[in-house]
């Protein structure tokens, strides 16, 4: 079973990229984030193509912001939009934003997540991010981590090895001790960061800012993760970043993360495909991108 996660950064603009990618990579389960569509708009944008490719889908959207989806050719059961006790924003009692959808696909509980960005350290958005992650942890514990995959744009670089220049990120979101502690608490429910476990010493990124040269110099971050419980992690045959999907005309600023369970149709082909040809050195590489997502 091939599972993929991809922040498409506005699906309506990305359909000409997403459909050929689905035809080429043929994932069985796909987690999409930042669709920026409501449910009807998602179906109108890509429903016909998904049906022709044999996918069922569940979409949780709210129009021009956020939006997450699950596509599956191996079953889509027990769909849950958001998760228990998901906090809202700005008031935790508000209705949850469209940032989480999960379902059982091929016997695995799969989450498609778009974790809040956090914006500025110490801000209301930052506290919301930490509260949201704590609630997610409780949801994963309740679901049973061993047969779970937590996939998506987690908006946290797990370690300094997961950013192009740790010094440039000091004091910014995505790398703070509190965010990393929240991610560690989630992983400690019994999950494994399957890409990093498979490639412990490699330079592996999944996001590159649109600013000129960032992608070509491989000045990126690894913030799109697949975390798998023990029953699932033991089945991993390959795990990689599909860097090819970040190339070309009108790409998303994120690349898909692909994990193969039981068998690897393309072989165990490396941490990023294709690898960057001329990456810049990590140090002295400028300021990190700022986002209000």
Image (cartoon, helix red, strand yellow):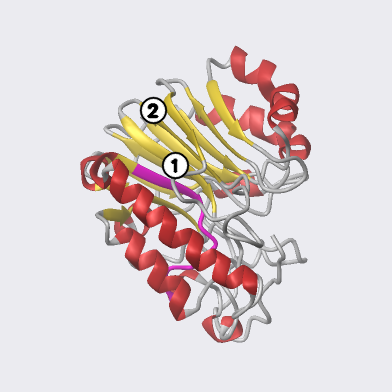
Q: Is residue 158 magenta?
A: yes
Taking the spot 68% from the left edge, 80% from the top edge, the residue there is 287
Q: Secondary structure at mark 1?
A: strand
Q: Mark 1 near mark 2, Cβ–Cβ under 8 Å? A: no
Which stretch is magenta?
Answer: 149-160
Q: Position of residue 182 (x, y in %)?
A: 41, 68
Q: Residue 160's spot in the image, x, y percent?
A: 45, 77
> Which label sits on residue 111?
1
Looking at the rendered structure, the number of numbered marks drawn on it comes to 2
Locate residue 82, reporting x and y percent.
52, 43
- Residue 106, by quadrant, is top left
In percent of width and height, residue 247 lies at 67, 48
The quadrant of the rendering that contains the N terminus is: top left
Could you tell me which residue is drawn at 46 percent across and 60 percent down? 133
Where on the picture, by quarter, is residue 123? bottom right
Instruction: Please determine whether, in this image, residue 137 is positioned above or below residue 236.
Output: below
Q: Does residue 37 appear anywhere in the picture?
A: yes
Left or right: where 12 falls relative to 245: right
Identify the residue at the far front of this view.
93
Q: Is residue 290 magenta?
A: no
For label 2, the SS is: strand
- Circle nearer the N terminus (1, 2): 2
Q: Relative to the observer, which residue lies in front, 258 or 228?
A: 228
Question: Taking the image as drawn, is residue 269 in sight?
Answer: no
What's the CA distance linking mark 1 and mark 2?
10 Å
The reply, left or right, for residue 153 in relation to residue 177 is right
Left/right placement of residue 228 relative to residue 266 reads left
The residue beneath circle 2 is 105
Residue at 59% x, 48% y: name it: 96
Q: Quadrant of the C terminus?
A: bottom right
Give the residue drawn at x 51%, y 75%: 175
């Amino acid at each position: 079973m091939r599972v993929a996660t991809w922040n498409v950064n506005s699906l309506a603009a990305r359909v000409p990229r997403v459909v050929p990618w689905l035809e080429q990579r043929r994932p069985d389960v796909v987690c999409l984030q930042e669709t920026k569509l409501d449910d009807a708009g998602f179906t109108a944008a890509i429903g016909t193509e998904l049906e022709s490719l044999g996918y069922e889908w569940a979409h949780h959207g709210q129009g021009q912001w956020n939006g997450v989806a699950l596509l599956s050719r191996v079953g889509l059961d027990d769909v849950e939009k958001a998760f228990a006790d998901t906090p809202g924003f700005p008031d935790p009692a508000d209705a949850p934003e469209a940032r989480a959808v999960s379902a059982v696909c091929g016997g695995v509980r799969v989450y498609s997540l778009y974790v809040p960005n956090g914006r500025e350290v110490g801000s209301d958005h930052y506290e919301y991010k930490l509260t949201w992650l704590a609630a997610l942890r409780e949801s994963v514990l309740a679901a049973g981590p061993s047969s779970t995959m937590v996939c998506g744009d987690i908006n946290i670089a797990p370690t300094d090895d997961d950013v192009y220049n740790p010094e440039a990120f000091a004091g910014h979101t995505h790398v703070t001790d509190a965010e990393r502690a929240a991610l560690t608490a989630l992983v400690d429910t019994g999950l494994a960061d399957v890409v990093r476990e498979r490639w412990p010493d490699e330079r592996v990124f999944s996001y590159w800012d649109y600013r000129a040269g960032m992608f070509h110099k491989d000045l990126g971050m690894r913030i799109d993760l697949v975390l798998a419980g023990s029953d699932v992690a033991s089945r991993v045959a390959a795990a990689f970043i599909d860097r090819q999907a970040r190339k070309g005309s009108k790409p998303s600023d994120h690349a898909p993360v692909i994990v193969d369970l039981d068998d690897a149709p393309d072989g165990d082909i490396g941490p990023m495909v294709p690898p960057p040809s001329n990456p810049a050195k990590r140090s002295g590489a400028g300021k990190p991108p700022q986002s209000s997502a």
